Image (cartoon, grey):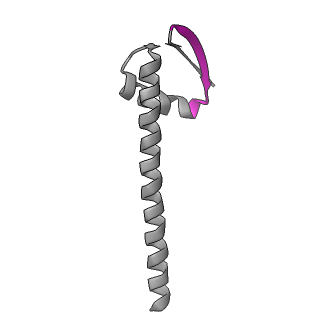
Amino acid sequence: MSKLSLQVGAKDFDIMLDDDFYDFFIDDFRKIFEDKRNIEIKELLRAFVQKSYDRYQDSKKIKQLLESIDDFKLNLNDI
C-alpha cells in the first residue's frame, strides 16, 4: 500500500492505494491537477464530473464494440 497526502478544501486527507494502482492514479491525478497538493472543492467536483463523463463515453464505446462482435459472430454462423 502507498500513501497519498493531499488537501481538499483546506482539509488534509491521507489516501491509501494499492501499489499497482498508485502509479496509475498519480499519473492521472497529475494530468488533471498538475503538481497541486491543495485542491479546491470546485476543482475536485469538476474533475469528478469529467471522469464520470469519460467513463460514460467509454461504456458506450464498449457496448458498441460488444454489439459489433455479436453481429460478427451471427454473420459467421450464417456462412
Residue 53's place in the image compared with 68, above or below, is above
Give the residue drawn at x 45%, y 37%. Answer: 51
Q: What stretch is highlighted in magenta?
A: 10-20
Give the residue drawn at x 47%, y 40%. Answer: 52
Give the residue drawn at x 48%, y 53%. Answer: 59
* In magenta stretch: residue 16: yes
In the image, residue 47 lies at what x, y percent?
43, 29
In the image, residue 7 lies at what x, y percent?
51, 12
Residue that protrudes farthest toward the top in the picture: 10
Question: What type of secondary structure mainly makes up the magenta span?
Answer: strand
2 to the left or right of 51:
right
Quadrant in the picture for the C terminus: bottom left
Residue 75's place in the image compared with 63, above or below, is below
14 to the left or right of 49:
right
Residue 69's place in the image compared with 11, above or below, is below
Give the residue drawn at x 40%, y 15%. Answer: 36
